Amino acid sequence: MTEIKDFHAHVYFNPESREAAARVRQGLSDRFEVQLGRWHDANVGPHPQSMYQVLFAPEQFGEIVSWLMLNREGLDILVHPTTGDDVADHTAHALWLGKKLALNIETLRKMTS
């Protein structure tokens, strides 16, 4: 059986929605024990637009994802597990809140080959 080490939520934003992304980030920080990644104002890895990452434990999934569903302020968010298979984690195992964005999965394949 595949084990989930942790979860990542990638919160996507653009210049017009950056303030909303900051409010979501602050809400996560205020309510949960999470690790907040830095702001990426340019595309990084497979991600097609600006984003920041939120790392959280498997036992927090229900509470955090439920909060994001109700408080994402219209932002698109990718939630995925960390299982050791980056391609599957970002595709087959992924959950999207909002619009599903087209990821550049080739960058993940190159990193693992």
Image (cartoon, grey):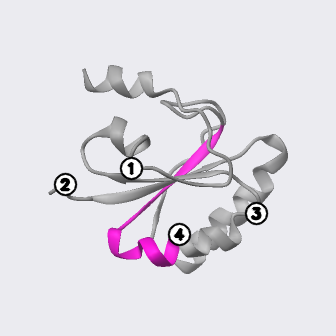
Q: Residue at x 58, y 70 (%)?
A: 28
User: What's the CA distance linking mark 3 and mark 4?
Assistant: 14 Å
Of mark 3 and mark 4, the one earlier in the sequence is 4
Over which residues does the magenta segment extend?
Answer: 50-65
User: What's the CA distance linking mark 4 and mark 2?
Assistant: 21 Å
| Depicted 11 relative to depicted 34: above or below | above
Q: What type is the residue that disc 4 sits on?
A: Val
Disc 2 is placed on an element classified as loop
Disc 3 is placed on an element classified as loop
The residue tagged 2 is 2
Quadrant for the N terminus in the image: bottom left
Residue at the far left: name it.
Answer: 1
Q: Position of residue 111 (x, y in %)?
A: 32, 24
| Depicted 96 relative to depicted 69: above or below | above
Quadrant for the C terminus in the image: top left
The residue tagged 1 is 93
Please rate how many residues cluster around mark 1, counting C-alpha atoms within 10 Å: few if below 14, some from 14 to 19, many from 20. some
Q: Residue at x 27, y 40 (%)?
A: 85
Q: Which mark is residue 73?
A: 3
- CB-based contact (under 8 Å), mark 1 and mark 4: no
Disc 1 is placed on an element classified as loop
User: What's the CA distance linking mark 2 and mark 1?
Assistant: 11 Å
Tell me if residue 33 can be seen. no
User: What's the CA distance linking mark 1 and mark 4?
Assistant: 15 Å
**Residue in front for this viewpoint, 12 or 1:** 1
**Residue in front for this viewpoint, 81 or 19:** 81
Q: What type is the residue that disc 2 sits on?
A: Thr
Disc 4 is placed on an element classified as helix
Magenta span has 60?
A: yes
The residue tagged 4 is 65
| Depicted 105 relative to depicted 64: above or below | above
